[in-house]
Amino acid sequence: MAVETDARSLTRHRLVEQVYGAIFSEITEGRLAPNTRLIQDELAEAYGVSRQPVQQALLLLRNHGIVRDAPRRGLVVAPLEASFVQNLYEVRGVLEGLTARLAAERNPARAGREGAPLVAAGQAAAKGGSVADLIAADIAFHRFLGEIAENPIIVETAAPHFNHLKRIMGEVLREDEAMPARIWDEHAAILSAIAAGDGEAADRLSRQHIARAATVFVDRLRAQEVASVEEARNRRVAR
């Protein structure tokens, strides 16, 4: 009986994970826009599951800051806020710089040997144009650097923010066709510095890479916020 109970529990857990991933992918790829209302019955029907795994997945998404409560509307997709993104990327720049420096000091040979295929995969994704593939390749590259930096605390510190980073990347990559190629050119330069054992250059290039990305992301979100405020003002005037 206990074995059967454990099996059912594992099945439910996996189903919740699948629903969580499906909803998150729709948000990241722009099919569920910010402030879209999330109705459990509709999601359950769309994914061919009962309401329970949808409810649990939505609660996890809320706990992770991906969706939020809205007065009289239930749960909606949480908007990305420019101030949050700015703060997140300030911290990420420090972490990525340190990661690259440690990787160069501790595993330059492995970086050159195992990092090149990851860069090649990212460059192929940039040419293919799939946002999902681009995000997956980017996460794989940065996780690899975290691994060869051999500091698990850096990885643990960054891990809770991966979903937010995926959302941010998805938001911008859908709108800027030139950015993917630039990102992977910068990744290639970072990897070259790490493989050469040049920790100082790897640190500097990584921080610059994150700073440039942050500038693009934050400027775009601020423009969207201004447009949203203006739209709300116009609606009030029209009444």
Image: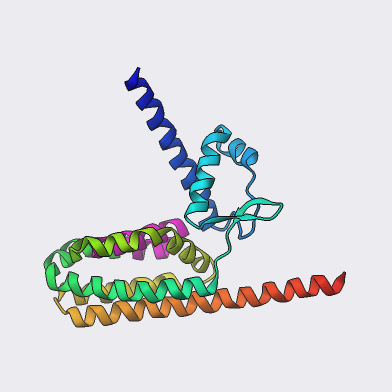
Image coords of residue 203 (percent x, y): 25, 79
Give the side of residue 9 with respect to residue 101, left or right. Answer: right
152 vs 58: above or below: below
Residue in the foreground of this view, choosing between 43 and 9: 9
Image coords of residue 93 (percent x, y): 34, 75
Give the side of residue 200 with respect to residue 52, left or right. Answer: left
Q: Which quadrant would the N terminus be assigned to in this image?
A: top left
Query: What range is drawn magenta here?
Result: 120-146
Query: How many numbered discs?
Result: 0
Which residue is pictured at 34% across the width and 81% down the height?
Answer: 208
Image color mode: rainbow
Asked if one can make out residue 120 in the rendered structure from this viewpoint, the answer is no
Which residue is pictured at 32% across the width and 79% down the height?
Answer: 207
Residue ranking furthest to the top: 1
Which residue is pictured at 58% across the width and 35% down the height?
Answer: 51
Asked if one can make out residue 230 in the rendered structure from this viewpoint, the answer is yes
Residue ranking furthest to the right: 239
Residue in the foreground of this view, choosing between 156 and 115: 156
155 vs 43: above or below: below
Image coords of residue 149 (percent x, y): 19, 66
| Main SS, magenta residues | helix
Give the side of residue 26 with respect to residue 39, left or right. Answer: left
Q: Place residue 183 in its image quadrant.
A: bottom left
Which residue is pictured at 30% across the width and 72% down the height?
Answer: 96
* Residue 134 magenta: yes
Image coords of residue 105 (percent x, y): 13, 73
Q: Which quadrant would the C terminus be assigned to in this image?
A: bottom right
* Residue 139 magenta: yes
Give the side of residue 110 with respect to residue 92, left or right. Answer: left
